[in-house]
Amino acid sequence: MSSELDSGSQLGVLYYCPCSGCMRTTDAPVKDSKQKREFAELAEEECRAPLDISTQKQLAVLRTWPIEKLYYCDDCSEVRCPHCVIEEPAGYHCPNCTFDVPTASVRSEKNSCARNCFHCPVCTHVLVVVVVESTQGDGGQSCSVLSCAVCMWDSREIGWEFETSTGISAQIERMRAGGPAVKEYASLLDYWRTVQRTASATAVGSHGLTSSASFKHRLTSAGLHGNTTSVDSLPPYKAACYVDSGAELTEDFKALEDANIIPFNGDPRTKEPQRVRLHMKLSRRCRMCHHILIKPESKAHNSRFKIQLLAANFLPTITFPNFLPASKARGSLLEHLNTTPLRVGSTAPVVLRFANPLYTEMDVSVDVGELDAAQTDVLAPRFTLPPFAELWEYDEDEDDSSLASPSASSSGRDSVKRGIIHQHGNQIAIQLDVTPRAQTQKLTIPLCITCTHLDDMAEMDTSDTSTPRRIVNTFWAYVSLGTVN
């Protein structure tokens, strides 16, 4: 789903990330407690401030995301979106053989698997090593080749036969050692190393600097600071594949234009197989405090996470209930909700269901932001979500508490808490009365939600006898209701 509000869907709830207004441009963590407190106060003020969303065009540019794509920094007590996190490599592995590659070997192996993992040049299927009879030398000798079990291609079509079935990548590198591409790359490397050494010597003599920044500055501003004859006097690079006269091309240069190394040209059965590229696992940090939000296991075969701070595990999940079961033998009291067409001047009931993911009670406060397109009344602006318990997922005999329905009488509504129409387990469904004021293709209601709960980790720590701290989270949620006729 896109980070912006999707105009194609009719009903949906997206969460707003305040990173566009209160995030710093630097990636350095805040170590000073006073400075960190100032940033936290700024973020809280930005989140609580009413947003200018008088038109739907202004609302479309806000950074809104589904809760499944958001993270939560428990150090900053703020929502983090994919735009305000820092990604770092946590490990490299081959997707074919699931071999874990050390980080120090990734560059030397050119980000490819150094074992016997190759892609078929015809169908891109993974090749396997088989032992066959050699076509070279005397008969009766065996050799190892790369073979494809899908298109029946094997490396003998390009003249690749290996002495052993292990270390195929190393044997291929030895075969390519005298190739034109390797010669040209070595020539380029030697030339630019000479340029770097000359520029570094010039920078030391004139400025006393040997850093890479001075080298880059030396190349881009040659002739501005004096003593520039060393680099300027270097001859221009000449390709190793050209002859000295420049009129004719050598056989090596003609080989560079061969279809074996130029993709999508010529017969695919004559191309060389390519090594399987490595995959990378990523860890994510908060851009504000550099606190780790996501940290997977480094092993390729392990799909677990060491640290996984998702917003869905800390903030209430808001959904539209399509069907809420009623107790006893009554029909469903809520099956007609959220299907009432929105019309100008007509009040339509909207039901939102809040689910508590924590093991402690959560006090929820719901306020409606400024909106000219409709008038919205929250019938239950304050309520308490019960804690999450896994037993409720399997307790089918427990009666649902359908407290009231929109069609019930006023006396029936007054007998229970106003606006709460259904409660079961850790979920509570509340009602909103929406009265559109003008026709629009996309009616979206902004809700400022404040959640307060005790730190459940402090309750698990029996050695800590101090009072558990209360955590307050304030965020914006945007409820899309569809078209107003």
Image (tube, rainbow, N blue to C red):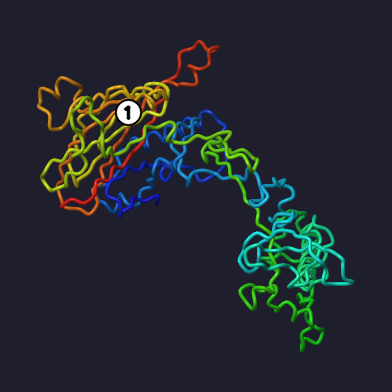
* Label 1 sits on residue: 427
Question: At x 15% / y 32%, what residue is drawn?
Answer: 406
Query: Is residue 292 placed above or below 190 in the rendered structure?
Result: above
As drawn, which residue projects farthest toward the bottom? 247
Question: At x 15% / y 50%, what residue is drawn?
Answer: 438
Query: Is residue 11 placed above or below 110 in the rendered structure?
Result: above
Position of 48 with respect to 265 (left or right) is left
When asked about the image quadrant of residue 158, the answer is: bottom right
Query: Is residue 472 placed above or below 94 in the rendered structure?
Result: above
Q: Give how far across and how far down residue 188 sits, in percent.
A: 76, 69
As drawn, which residue projects farthest toward the front? 140
As drawn, which residue projects farthest toward the right? 138
Foreground pick, 201 / 370: 370
Q: Amino acid at mark 1?
A: Gln
Position of 368 with respect to 209 (left or right) is left
Residue 213 visible within the image: no
Question: At x 61% / y 66%, what residue is drawn?
Answer: 123
When asked about the image quadrant of residue 146, the answer is: bottom right
Give the secondary structure at mark 1.
strand
Foreground pick, 50 / 402: 402
Question: At x 64% / y 73%, what residue is drawn?
Answer: 268
> How many numbered marks have been drawn onto this rendered protein structure?
1
When asked about the image quadrant of residue 150, the answer is: bottom right
Q: Give how far across and how far down residue 47 sits, in percent.
A: 36, 37
Foreground pick, 274 / 365: 274
Q: Residues within 10 Å of mark 1 (few under 14, many from 20)?
A: many
Q: Give how far across and how far down residue 470 sits, in percent.
A: 42, 21
